[in-house]
Image (cartoon, helix red, strand yellow):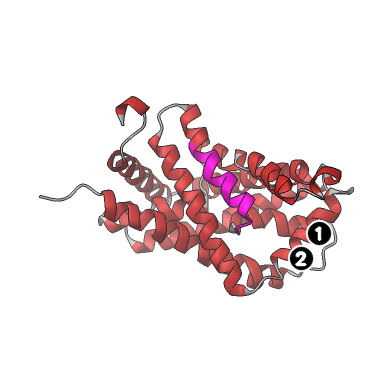
């Protein structure tokens, strides 16, 4: 593994455990945690609007090539997670996995996990809403077609799926996102961390999975653009099932499994 200049799975788990402990400690400072989490919401919304502008900006080409639109959106959306990881912001979905190693090893309480997840989720929402309103809607980025029609259609589609389907897509999304975080932790250089973030996140966007924090941009932006979607509908039909799926995909399929597989064995 040293020839590849990346950490081994066990070394990556040790790094994840250290990151999780830092996040658990950060939970004690509510004000700082709220700011770092709001920034993460902004970063993910930034990735969201960029994926919308680029992915839906060539309708004459993508109309007959639907996979191209997914690829274009997927290629640029990861900037959000890259900013979160490199700048140390607090993202709910990433924390789903990172808090598991210290919790399973007895150095972090479940009370701290629930408190962190709750505060970070709410602050991610605030940051995403503020960015969407001031930096997207007020700037006129989605006022004209093809982006206006695209964002309203996206918002409608996200609240029109069966609840269980949204949850399953939520599992897929955060499985990918937390694998991206894990890959970033295995790298040493900025380029390695960026590559680790980019590949799995590009995949989840191209596959159409449901990321609760990203949807805090897509659905409110659609509502601002005139989509007939209510706040209660947004929460019950998308954000709640996507959040549950994100927790399963991140905490169980990445955090718990990788801790069980790669934790140093006690003698």
Question: At 66% across and 39% down in the image, what residue appears?
Answer: 76
> Is 53 colored magenta in this rendering?
no
Q: Position of residue 144 (x, y in %)?
A: 89, 48
* Most common SS among magenta residues: helix
Whether residue 240 is visible here, answered yes or no, is no
Residue sitting farthest toward the left: 267
Name, please, the residue furthest toward the right.
144
Mark number displayed over residue 184: none
Instruction: Point out residue 70 in the picture as x, y percentages from the top left corner.
Output: 69, 48
Residue carrying label 1: 152
Do the residues under discs 2 and 1 have CB atoms within 8 angstroms? yes
Q: Is residue 157 left or right of residue 145?
A: left
Q: Quadrant of residue 35?
A: top right
Q: CA distance from mark 2 to mark 1?
A: 6 Å
Q: Label 1 crowding class (10 Å Cα cut-off): few <14, some 14-19, many 20+?
A: many
Considering only vertical position in the picture, is 193 above or below 206?
above
Q: SS class of the residue under badge 1?
A: helix
Q: Quadrant of residue 112?
A: bottom left
Q: Residues within 10 Å of mark 2 (few under 14, many from 20)?
A: some
Expressed as whole percent of the image width and height from the top left, the position of residue 18 reads 33, 42
Residue 198 forms part of the magenta stretch: yes
235 relative to 86, above or below: below
Q: Could one spot residue 9 in this view of the protein? A: yes
Q: Secondary structure at mark 2?
A: helix
Q: Nearer the viewer, residue 27 or 249?
A: 249
* Number of numbered labels in the structure image: 2
Q: Which residue is mark 2?
A: 156
Question: Which segment did they paint magenta?
Answer: 196-209
């Amino acid at each position: 593994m040293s020839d590849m200049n990346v950490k081994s799975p066990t070394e990556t788990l040790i790094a994840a455990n250290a990151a999780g402990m830092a996040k658990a400690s950060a939970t004690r400072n509510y004000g700082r945690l709220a700011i770092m989490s709001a920034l993460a919401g902004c970063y993910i919304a930034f990735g969201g609007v960029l994926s919308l502008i680029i992915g839906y900006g060539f309708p004459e080409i993508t109309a007959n090539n639907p996979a191209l639109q997914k690829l274009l959106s997927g290629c640029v959306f990861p900037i959000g997670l890259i900013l979160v990881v490199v700048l140390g912001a607090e993202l709910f979905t990433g924390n789903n996995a990172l808090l598991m190693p210290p919790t399973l090893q007895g150095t972090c309480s479940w009370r701290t996990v629930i408190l962190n997840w709750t505060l970070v989720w709410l602050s991610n929402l605030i940051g995403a809403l503020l960015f969407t309103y001031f930096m997207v809607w007020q700037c006129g980025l989605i006022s004209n077609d093809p982006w206006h029609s695209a964002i309203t259609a996206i918002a409608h589609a996200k609240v029109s799926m069966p609840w269980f389907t949204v949850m399953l897509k939520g599992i897929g999304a955060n499985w990918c996102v937390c694998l991206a975080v894990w890959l970033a932790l295995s790298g040493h250089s900025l380029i390695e961390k960026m590559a680790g973030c980019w590949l799995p996140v590009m995949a989840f966007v191209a596959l159409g999975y449901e990321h609760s924090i990203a949807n805090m941009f897509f659905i409110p932006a659609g509502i601002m653009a005139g989509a007939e979607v209510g706040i209660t509908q947004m929460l019950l039909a998308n954000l709640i099932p996507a959040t549950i799926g994100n927790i399963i995909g991140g905490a169980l399929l990445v955090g718990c499994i990788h801790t069980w597989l790669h934790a140093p064995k006690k003698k």
